[in-house]
Image: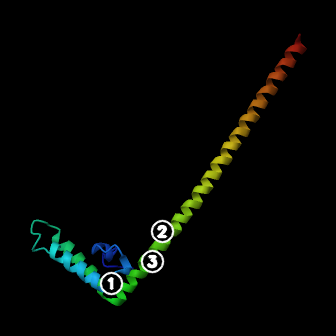
Amino acid sequence: MDTGGVENAYEVLGLSQGPNATPAEIRQAYRRLALAKHPDKNKDNPDAAAEFALLQSSYTLLTDADARAALDALIRVREAQRAQRGAQDAKRQRLVDELERREAAAQGHQRGEASAAAQLAREVARLRREAAE
């Protein structure tokens, strides 16, 4: 979905409440930032025009009911995906921990097997020496 370069219009306007922001809060945030970021007020900032254009497109997106609903739906989907990835990461970490535990146990078993094989080789060598005498 193309959001016109606006990843999250709420963040552009500094609205931490996101989809719960009221139209009055959106308008107030826009006006406050428009005064501060207007290119005429920021003549020394070469990016002022681009920042102001982003601010305007964010405001336009949030004041159009259909566009705002689409943005809110996109935000909900992304949050659900993030939560799912977090759950998958926790599950993946449990699986990694279990695998490491089993590998450590297998290495311990292999060390025990190697120790037993070495003991057997020593006993065979001792018996051969005794038989040779």
Q: Quadrant of the C terminus?
A: top right
Dot 1: what SS? loop
> Label 1 is placed on what type of residue?
Thr
Which residue is tagged 1?
Answer: 22
Q: Please name the colour scheme applied to the rendered image.
A: rainbow
The disc placed on residue 125 is none
> Label 2 to label 1, Cα distance in Å?
25 Å
Dot 3: what SS? helix
| Among numbered discs 1 and 3, the one appearing first in the sequence | 1
Residue 79, horizontal then vertical, whole percent: 46, 72
Closest to the observer, 69 or 20: 20
Which residue is tagged 3?
Answer: 76
- Decide: is 13 above or below 100: below
What's the residue at 78%, 31% (across, down)? Answer: 116
Which residue is tagged 2?
Answer: 82
Residue 114, horizontal then vertical, whole percent: 74, 32
What's the residue at 36%, 89% (across, down)? Answer: 66
Residue 90, horizontal then vertical, whole percent: 56, 60
How dense is the environment of label 3, judged by Cα within 10 Å: few (below 14), some, or many (20 and up)?
few
Give yes or no for contact between labels 2 and 3 (Cβ–Cβ under 8 Å).
no
Q: Classify residue 28 as left or right of residue 77.
A: left
- Decide: is 120 above or below 68: above
Dot 2: what SS? helix
> Label 3 is placed on what type of residue?
Arg
> Label 2 is placed on what type of residue?
Arg
| Disc 1 versus disc 3: nearer the observer | 1
Give residue 69's quadrant in the image.
bottom left
What's the residue at 17%, 68% (across, down)? Answer: 47
How dense is the environment of label 2, judged by Cα within 10 Å: few (below 14), some, or many (20 and up)?
few
| Among numbered discs 2 and 3, the one appearing first in the sequence | 3
